[in-house]
Image (cartoon, helix red, strand yellow):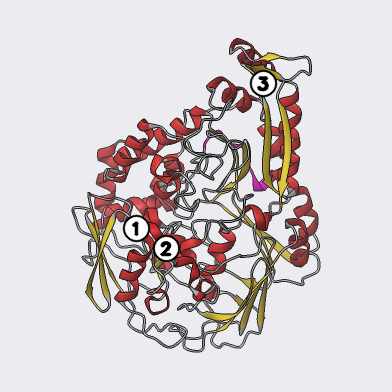
Amino acid sequence: MNEQELWRLMRRVRDGKMSRRAFVRRMAAVGLTAPMATQLLAFAGVSPASAQSVPEYKPTRRGGGQVKIIYWQGATLLNPHFAVGTKDQDGSRLFYEPLAGWAADGTLVPILAAEIPSIENRGLAEDGRSVTWKLRRDVKWHDGEPFSADDVVFNWEYARDPGTAAVSIGSYRDINVVKVDDFTVRVEFQKPTPFWADAFVASRGMIIPKHKFKDYVGANSRDAPTNLRPVGTAAYRFAEFQPGDLVKGEANPNYYLPNRPFFDSVEVKGGGDAVSAARAVLQTGEFDYAWNLQVEDEILKRLEAAGRGRVNIVEGGNIEFIQLNQTDPWTEVDGERSSIKTTHPSLSDPAVRKALSLLVDKKSIQDFIYGRGGPATANFLNNPPRFRSPNMTWEFNIAKANEILDQAGWARGPDGIRAKGGVKLKYVFQTSINAPRQKTQQIIKQAAQRAGIDIEIKSVTASVFFSSDVANPDTYTKFYADIQMYTTTMTQADPQLFMNQYCSWEIASKENKWQGRNIVRWRNEEYDRTFRAAEGELDPVKRAALFIKLNDLIVGSNAIIPLVQRPLVSASLNALRAPLSAWDNTFWLLRDWYRET
């Protein structure tokens, strides 16, 4: 399908001459999923059909008792602007809401917004330079204070202040937000912006109250008492928090939607491991829901056979991958290791990175570890399919890795370890404690030994590895190791935010309290230029090509090594009804969770 034909079809939908469903089917025929088709329609000014994307909420009353959820990584803070990991984003989402969230099919669903902006309702400017949000008028904060446009504008001011060191700064730094009236805000862009649903949307868009945080903007942002005792607008209000262990909420009696929430209280228990979490739902029924089951598929199938619950597999854009540090983690500069002022003594060599990429047996990792929960991939950006590059390939070839290292002058020493210029190919490879990850480490370590590379395996407790504590030396954001592995999440049905994590201005550092998203510390001027072009490209076909190029630049550099795609894998009791989305947080629509009787 060429560009002109695509635009012709989108105009037919906009003019009412073709149904949305027929358009989605037509797009599927050429390899585009429903989320991408929906986004194309949004670009063309077609109002979203969000009501069709959310399962029907059936309860006619409250009083459903307690829902118990197990997270084997417990939340460590409850401020969404500081949530560097999924566990803290989800912990915050219990109590805070954005203007809109992403449904499983990629459509936007209004939450604190009264409606989703479109060209038809004059919310989207035709020149792509602004979006106007109308807010619900019936929302109150948990302490009874009214929610208004002042809170939305404050979140922009709070997040964009470099002194605040918010992980969300990238979504707010380059925009201007104007209060139109008490229940209307306008987001203004510096240039035509095709992806306008970033600020105030989904995991990056949870709104915190101005009256609780106005005295904690900038350097003293971490001192706010409400960082640990949230006051939000969500269906559940704060009851108890034990960092790394337990979060509890109780039903908000003044929630703005009828018959919600169904449950009287929600408990999210942290700790343990993914296998025990799966057993706690599928085998014992002690919990209603288990999050992020990074568990060997063979084990999940055995547990599921008991018939108590089901494994949920929701397709999205998450990826398990390896990072090769581009800076030196063993040299300290101005009180900071892995400083951008240093260069890694061996991983800066393209030949070494290429060799390492050839030593990863992705087929074995897929077949013997992840199964349904992890198809092997050559790409970092895998979904929606329109953005998936056809250019990247992968292979497992130890002989070829040896040949590359020989040609690059990395010779084996008496101990069998390769070296050049006094630098040995010896690495510390870290990840979180998790059986599939430790098995993956072992597969790579064994192959590396056959190529003259020595790997020391380091496993860090998940609550430590993914901690938001800036004083913790073992966080993945500090990256005080040579190699590390984890899953990065794609919390939007659009790749813009996902791909900004390799922009030079996103480098994690002491200066930004390690809140920058470029953790591998990779720098490439062509990547930066291409990303800036993609930000302003309104043509969806050209924009997709730019994101494919971004994928090819970072994957082709071998500074990262994609392993397997990570659909959202969770478990729930048979009676639990929980709308899940791989494009947003697990609790994106917690208000609609209920138990069938």
Reading the chain from its start, which is encountered first: label 1 or label 3?
1
Region in magenta? 372-379
| Labels 2 and 1 touching (C-beta < 8 A) | no
Q: CA distance from mark 3 to mark 2?
A: 50 Å
Identify the element where label 3 is drawn: loop
Q: CA distance from mark 1 to mark 3?
A: 44 Å
266 or 24, nearer to the observer = 266
Give the residue at mark 2. 219
Reading the chain from its start, which is encountered first: label 2 or label 1?
1
**Residue depicted at 43% across the width and 88% down the height:** 144
| Labels 1 and 3 touching (C-beta < 8 A) | no
Identify the disc placed on residue 397: 3
Q: Inspect the image, locate mark 2, and give the three-letter code of the amino acid beneath it.
A: Ala
**Residue depicted at 39% across the width and 59% down the height:** 163
Residue 317 picture location, percent across and down? 51, 48
Task: Name, please, the residue furthest toward the left.
Answer: 127
Please state which of the two labelled residues, at mark 1 or mark 3, is closer to the viewer. 1
Identify the disc placed on residue 172: 1
Reading the chain from its start, which is encountered first: label 3 or label 2?
2
Residue 399 picture location, percent across and down? 69, 16
- The quadrant in which the N terminus is found is top left
Left or right of 23 on screen, residue 246? right
**Residue count near mark 3 (Cα–Cα under 10 Å), binned few <14, some 14–19, many ≥20:** some
Q: Inspect the image, locate mark 3, and give the three-letter code of the amino acid beneath it.
A: Asn
107 or 463, nearer to the observer = 463
Identify the disc placed on residue 115: none
**Residue depicted at 30% across the width and 62% down the height:** 47
**Residue count near mark 2 (Cα–Cα under 10 Å), binned few <14, some 14–19, many ≥20:** few
Please state which of the two labelled residues, at mark 2 or mark 1, is closer to the viewer. 2
